[in-house]
Amino acid sequence: MSLVTDSAVWRPFTQHALQPGAFKIARAEGAWLEAEDGTRFLDAISSWWVITHGHRHPAIMQAIREETERLDQIIFAGFTHEPAEALARRLVTLTPPGLDYVFYSDSGSTCVEVAIKMALGFWRNRNDARSRVIALEYGYHGDTIGTMSAGARSPFNAPYEPLLYEVTRIPFPMRGREQQTLDALARACRDKPAALLVEPLILGAGGMLMYGADTLAEMRRICAHYGVLFIADEVMTGFGRTGTLFACEQADVIPDIACYAKGLTGGALPLAVTMCKSEIFEAHLSQDRARAFFHSSSYTANPIACAAALANLDVWATGEPAARVAALCDMQATRIARFADDARFSNARRLGIITALDLNVAQSGYLASVSLDLMRFFNERGLLLRPLGPTIYVFPPYCVEDAELDLAYEAIGDAADRFGRG
């Protein structure tokens, strides 16, 4: 098992003084990554939550190959192409009703940034001076300036504090304390903010924190009552992760603006969309060019990425992914249950295909050094697991098999023997 240590690459979320090397992956298939030296890793976190059906799904790979024979990159201002038009039509029929407009971007961070800008532009163009955003405690929405501002203040964004705008932060709805969150939201809404930005049902980078669909529904109701825009950040939760195609379905919530990214292409290529209700679009529609929505990226609606997304939707249309998700939910429920009363862990939990549990150690928080110890331990066992501090989570692609999942959970138990207490 060899590491590349002389690379010129600066890797994300990596302290190179502590993690000087990286495994050089040569090929991937299904739930597995294979390094150049033949070492194999079970991708138990879907390569940072993007891979849905499995690596190199044949139908998606074929669609990418075919589209490269027709188009590469086309300017998307004043020009369009069929992959983008077809994908927009499909998404409007697939997502919660009323999300009638599709704005393309490249990543989770950018599509949430777009959502925030849409919300502020909506109020400005209606001559209503609203610019305040409400966000959940422990939330994470990306690494651009706008999304960092909406996210929790943490080591992730501390160096950039002078650039960040203030938001109104409400408590995370911990079990038994949901009413505190709802009361805080109602108070904040009375001050006429622009929008509430929320990760529905589960906060990912904040520690895989989970809350109920009834709470999500009540948050939506409060926003509607006070005329506050509701933005659903489904970057991570979309495309089956929570057990339904979109997390908002479980609460019967229709957001004013919704963000989808990671699973949009099945994880094969970067692509994101921000979808909105017609009134958001129409607030920017004017003979006055100054009221236009001023956002773009050079690769907006890349045709090859759109073709991959269309192929992904075709895969979903077969019904097979939904069946795989249902089976994986059961597989995960069975396995996390073994840790429910394990004194080495706290708060063993599951939502859809995602499980998480907190290793009982002296340290806490994302920067707890035990996370690096755990990562190395799992790598040595042929696993890609990347704990959030002492929080270990399993977030596999839908193709994973029972025996493969067993490898992950056996390693988690062994890791607790070595690093945990209780």
Image (tube, rainbow, N blue to C red):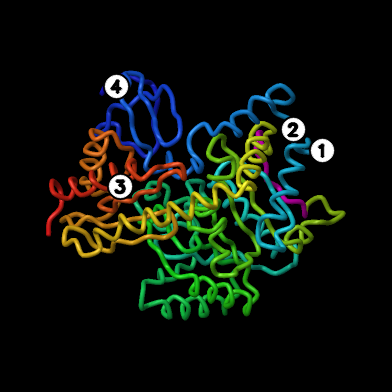
State how many labels appear: 4
Instruction: Determine the CA span between mark 4 and mark 2.
Output: 39 Å
Residue to which mark 4 is pinned:
5
Image point 38% across, 56% down: which residue? Answer: 206
Compare marks 4 and 3 and give the one earlier in the sequence. 4
- Other residues around mark 2 within 10 Å, as few (<14) / some (14–19) / many (≥20): some
Q: Which residue is mark 1?
A: 78
Determine whether 422 is above or below 372 in the image: below
Q: Is residue 145 magenta?
A: no
In the rendered view of the protein, which quadrant contains the N terminus?
A: top left
Q: Residue 314: give x, y in percent of width and height.
A: 65, 43
Which numbered disc flags the more N-terminal residue, 4 or 2? 4
Residue type at tag 1 = Gly
Provide the residue designation for mark 2: 75
Stretch in magenta: 291-299
Residue at position x 56%, y 63% in the image: 248
SS class of the residue under badge 1? loop
Label 2's element? loop
- Mark 1 or mark 3: which is in front? 3
Please say if 407 is above or below 242: above
Provide the residue designation for mark 3.
Answer: 387
Spatial CA span between label 4 and label 1: 46 Å
